[in-house]
Amino acid sequence: VPSYEASSLIEAGPDRVWPVLANPSAWPDWDSGVSEVEGRLVLGEKLSIAVDANPGRAFGVKVVTLEEPKRIVLRGGMPFGLFTGERTYTLRPEGAATRFEMREEYRGPLAKLIFRSIPDLGPSFRQFAEGLKAQAERG
């Protein structure tokens, strides 16, 4: 399955990390690689996310899972399951710290073709993970 992923160990509990992660309209305020988010993080609602890695194009995604303070899953793609991108943000306690993981998987008959055509999201995923760490540790 074509995918991207990144993680960070944040020196703060999930109760401090969750409010930062679960406020997508503020993602552009810290070094997330996200330039703009429209919409609300509410189960079943749609978000439009613009990223620095692919300027001039916003991605429409639907909030399909929202488990405070553990997991957010966003899904977007093409009709009829031809292509689906699913991004999962996970927070897990690790002692007094929090392990943050983000992963995006691509599925469907066109997944490999589309995966080759999108920019390398690895650096922007690492930027998001490190930005979330810095923001949450600042408190």
Image (tube, rainbow, N blue to C red):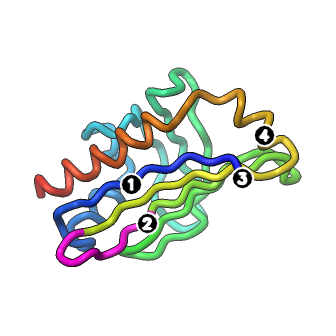
Q: CA distance from mark 1 to mark 3?
A: 19 Å
Q: CA distance from mark 1 to mark 4?
A: 24 Å
- Residue type at tag 1: Ser
Residue 134 image position (x, y, % from top left): 19, 48
User: Within 10 angstroms of label 4, few (less than 14), some, or many (20 or more) residues?
Assistant: some
Element class at badge 3:
loop
Asked whether, in this view, residue 10 is left or right of residue 23, the answer is left
User: Within 10 angstroms of label 1, few (less than 14), some, or many (20 or more) residues?
Assistant: many
Residue receiving disc 2: 90
Asked whether, in this view, residue 33 is left or right of residue 84, the answer is left
* Mark nearer the N terminus (1 vs 4): 1
Q: Are marks 1 and 3 in contact (CB under 8 Å)?
A: no
- Residue type at tag 4: Lys
Residue receiving disc 1: 7
Q: CA distance from mark 3 to mark 4?
A: 8 Å
Q: Are marks 2 and 3 in contact (CB under 8 Å)?
A: no
Residue 89 image position (x, y, % from top left): 46, 60
Q: CA distance from mark 2 to mark 3?
A: 19 Å
Report the disc number at residue 1.
Answer: 3
Q: Quadrant of residue 92?
A: bottom left
Is residue 122 inside the magenta stretch? no
Nearest-to-viewer mark from 2 and 3: 3
**Total number of numbered discs in the rendering:** 4
Q: Quadrant of residue 114?
A: top right
* Mark nearer the N terminus (2 vs 4): 2
| Residue at x 65%, y 30% (from the top left corner) | 118
Q: Which residues are magenta?
A: 90-97
Element class at badge 4:
helix
Say which of 88 and 5 sits in front.
Answer: 5
